[in-house]
Image (tube, rainbow, N blue to C red):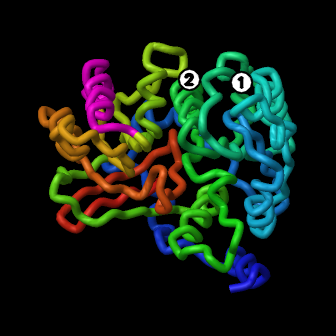
Amino acid sequence: MNRKHFLSFLVTAGVSASSSNVWGNYKGINGSFTAELAKSKIPPYLKRGDTIGITSPASYISLLDIQPATQVIQSWGFNTEIGKTIGAKDFSLGGTDEERTADFQQMLDDPDIKAIMCARGGYGVVRIIDKLNFDKFKANPKWIIGFSDITVLHAHINSNYNIASIHSKMCNSFPSDWALAKPMQIETLLSIRQVLSGQDVKYSAPPVSYNRPGRAEGILVGGNLSIIETLAGSSSDLKTDDAILFLEDTHEELYRVDRMFWNLKRSGKLDKLKGLIIGGFSLEEETPGEEFGKTVYDIVTEKVKEYNYPVCFDFPVGHQINNFALKCGAKHILNVDNNGSSLVSI
C-alpha cells in the first residue's frame, strides 16, 4: 500500500471496534446519572479545520520523528501546531523544565488549539505539573492526549478538575513506513480520531479464566500503574472511588508489580471500585533461582478477592500494538461474562 492510498484509507476507514449510536442517549442503568458522574466535563469534540498542538512535556523527540504523525493527523482534516519543545533537548528531556512548562502552558491557554497531543512519554511530566496553571483550561477545556508518563496529566486533570482526557498512543507510535503498517496498528491510530470526533467506541477482549464476571457503570480512570503509585499523597493523586479503573505497565519485575498492587490495596484505591481492567503488562526476565512465583493474574486476583466488582484481564491498552484510545474521566460501561469483556463509552 503506497503512502497516498494509505492516507486516503485513514480518512475514510472506520475502526472495527466502534459501537453503534444506540449508546449515544444512554442515561444509566437506573435511568439517570449519579451526582458524581454528572460532574464530569467533556471537552468539545473536534471538527475539520480544528488545530491539534503537539508538544513534548516529557522526553526528547525530533521534528523528523513526529512527521508521520502530523501527516496522518492532517489527513484527518485537522491542522497541527508544533511546539517549541519538539527538537529541544536537555539530556533525555524534551527541553529544560522551564521550556517544557512554557510550551505546554502556551497550548493550554491558546483558544485556537482544541487538543494537545503529547509527542512521547518516557519521563518528565512530574517535574512540571506543579508549575502549570490550569485556570484557562478549566474555563475552556480541551483534549489532552497521551499515555505512559502522560498518566501524570490524566490523573491530575481527572481528579482535580473532573475533565475528560484521552489515554492513547502518541506521535512516536505512528509508523514511518505506511506499507508495513499492521491492521491493528491502523485500528489503534484511527481510534484516536474516533474519540476526538465524538464517535461512540466499544472495545472488547477475549475471555480469560481469571476474569470475574459482572457489569459496572462508572467514570473511567487509570493509566500506568507505576506512575499512579508515585502520585499517591500528592495533589495529582488519582481518585478511584466509584470508578472503573484500568491499569497497565511495562518493563517491570513481578515482585515490583506485586508491591505496587499492595500499595493500591493498602491506600484504599481498590476498595470502592465499580470495576477493574487490567491491560498489558510486559515483564522483565526473572533471575533464575529468584523467581517470584506468581503471575500478574495471581497478583491481581489476590488483591481483589474480597471485593465483588467485575475484573477483566488482557484488555487492549498499554505499551503494546493493541493500545486503543480510552476516554479518561468519562462515563463507561464495563461488561465481563463468559464471552469476554467489553468497554463502552457513553
- Looking at the image, residue 130 sits to the left or right of residue 4; the answer is left
- As drawn, which residue projects farthest toward the left? 306
Magenta part, dominant SS: helix
Task: Please check the rendered image and state whether residue 253 is part of the magenta-colored stretch, yes or no.
Answer: yes
Q: Which mark is residue 134?
A: 1
Q: Which residues are magenta?
A: 252-271
Q: How many marks?
A: 2
Q: Please give the residue where the numbered disc 2 appears in the rendered image.
A: 160
Secondary structure type for disc 1: loop
Q: Is residue 6 visible?
A: yes
Seen at 28% across and 52% down, the residue is: 313
Q: Residue furthest front?
A: 288
Expressed as whole percent of the image width and height from the top left, the position of residue 12 reads 68, 79
Q: Are marks 2 and 1 in contact (CB under 8 Å)?
A: yes
Q: Which residue is painted at 20% across and 61% down in the image? A: 337
| Disc on the earlier residue, 2 or 1 | 1
Q: Position of residue 151 (x, y in %)?
A: 54, 35
Residue drawn at 33 percent across, 63 percent down: 205
